[in-house]
Image (spheres, coloured by chain):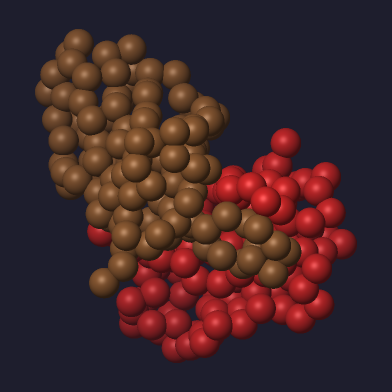
Amino acid sequence: DGGITQSPKYLFRKEGQNVTLSCEQNLNHDAMYWYRQDPGQGLRLIYYSQIVNDFQKGDIAEGYSVSREKKESFPLTVTSAQKNPTAFYLCASTTWFKTALMGNQPQHFGDGTRLSIL
Amino acid sequence: AQKITQTQPGMFVQEKEAVTLDCTYDTSDQSYGLFWYKQPSSGEMIFLIYQGSYDEQNATEGRYSLNFQKARKSANLVISASQLGDSAMYFCAMREGATGTASKLTFGTGTRLQVTL
């Protein structure tokens, strides 16, 4: 079955530690995204990538880093510079919006990773 | 900058009744798209329905329909014949980005729907 796999489901970070969240997709999508969701809130964009070896900052990129070495993979590192990392992290992917007829292509989401501070 | 507003933090509806979840948006783009997602307590985001800014007909997908009023910049989700399994958070989102790029979504803060017996 095609889809997006995020791991781990739960993650705990010690102070001063970097942690990496995994996101893998087998949908052959070009674009991938990372969102952060705080309790009772909507999703905020951290980083996104349109193609391999290219990525752009979203609205809340400070304290996070990403890489896109393979089309299928878009890992997110939460660095020690992110002082309030406790949140639910969602990864998504979609095809490029190549023509107006493709504008209806939704972003597909993984099941998320819940990150907490120890 | 694009903005999505969902003014109903929580809604209750009785089973088998219809419910409308409100969404208003603000954009200066002529071409845009509006999406609704459902997020159950388990956390995954489930795509429900899409409306393009140039679509003349309101979108429908099974029990879901979209009441799109372009002049008022509103895209309300209507769920007919509510079921207990419809209890979840519902998010409205708007796509920005020109053709030939990866689309970015701006999300509202969501509405928590509770379906009661």
In the image, taking residue B52 as reference, residue A60 lies left or right, namely: left
Q: Who's the residue at 56% across and 65% down the image?
A: A105
Chain shaded brown = A
The answer to whether A58 is drawn above or below residue B16 in the figure is above
In the figure, residue A117 lies in which quadrant?
top left
Please indicate, yes or no, whether residue B90 appears anywhere in the rendered image.
no
B79 or A62: nearer the viewer? A62
* Figure chain in red: B
Examine the rendering and report whether any part of residue B35 can be seen.
Answer: yes
Quarter occupied by the C terminus of chain A: top left
A118 left or right, relative to A66? left
Residue A62, quarter of picture = top left
Q: Position of residue B34 (x, y in %)?
A: 65, 61
Tell how many labels: 0
Between residue A20 and residue A112, name the one nearer to us.
A20
In the depicted structure, whether residue A29 falls above or below residue A58: below
- Quadrant, the N terminus of chain A: bottom left
Q: Position of residue B9 (x, y in %)?
A: 51, 52
Q: Residue at x 48, y 51 (%)?
A: A30
Q: Residue A46 placed where, x, y %?
A: 46, 33
Q: In the image, residue B98 lies at what x, y percent?
A: 72, 48
Q: Which residue occupies the foreground of this view, A40 or B39?
A: B39
Residue found at the far right of this picture? B71
In which quadrant of the rendered view does residue B43 lie? bottom left
Q: Identify whether B74 is placed above or below A37.
A: below
Q: Residue at (65%, 74%) from the top-left corner?
A: B66
